[in-house]
Image: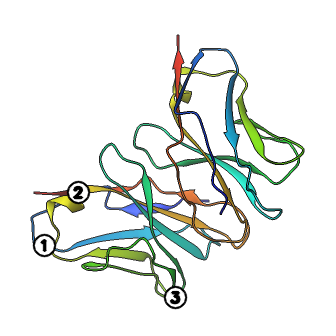
Amino acid sequence: NAGVMQNPRHLVRRRGQEARLRCSPMKGHSHVYWYRQLPEEGLKFMVYLQKENIIDESGMPKERFSAEFPKEGPSILRIQQVVRGDSAAYFCASSPDQGGAFFGQGTRLTVV
Amino acid sequence: DAKTTQPTSMDCAEGRAANLPCNHSTISGNEYVYWYRQIHSQGPQYIIHGLKNNETNEMASLIITEDRKSSTLILPHATLRDTAVYYCIATHNQGGKLIFGQGTELSVKP
């Protein structure tokens, strides 16, 4: 049973470009979560999704950030018009209906 | 979710047991205690969770006090590879986000 798969592992974008981060949850998991970790800081919750629904986006910045978890395919975290302050590690986790969440290895976004 | 309190850092000698405490005095009856760790900026790793009974798996043991206001994660024979930040989280067991605090930075020393 493959774990949570995130790609790419590393992503470099110039200021103003778009970043798309992908997350494939574990088989049988219908809940997906995105977290951000700025350099030398803790893990911050961004958004919680189920298939085709955003359940909790209380941690998402109000502008430029969006997330989706379509009926088919991976969950996508999209950052438009990236700025240097978006440079961080972005972690995705998935969980079943009951039980804990399992995390992917993250995507490290660098904005130059 | 209930707030948890952990020491900022701890040291442990290699080969000895590491006992990591966590206070969760406001935990509600249906909230579980989860433990995760993050090794040097890797993705957080699930360790163990429990409701009120003590739990053990291949990684660790979880001891929860009878009043459920605190718990201890035990790594029975710590190795250098157990050096990490350990997070204790009280949360419901039915989906829902995990809120990470500052955790305990465990340093295992030779």
Q: Is residue B31 left or right of residue A72?
A: right
- Which numbered disc, 1 or 2, marks the residue that appears first in the sequence? 1
Question: Which residue: 55% across, 59% down?
Answer: B99
Residue sitting nearer the eye, B65 or A47: B65
Asked if marks 1 and 2 fall on the same chain, the answer is yes
Location of residue B77 (image quadrant): top right
Kindly identify which residue carries mark 2.
A87
Look at the numbered discs 2 and 3 and tell me whether their residues touch, using CB distance below 8 Å. no
Look at the numbered discs 1 and 2 and tell me whether their residues touch, using CB distance below 8 Å. no
Which chain does the numbered disc 1 sit on? A
Question: Which residue: 58% across, 74% down?
Answer: A31
Q: Position of residue B58 (x, y in %)?
A: 74, 37
Q: Position of residue B50 (x, y in %)?
A: 79, 51
Q: Amino acid at mark 1?
A: Gln
Kindly identify which residue carries mark 1.
A17
Kindly identify which residue carries mark 3.
A53
Q: Secondary structure at mark 1?
A: loop
Residue sitting nearer the eye, A76 or A1: A76
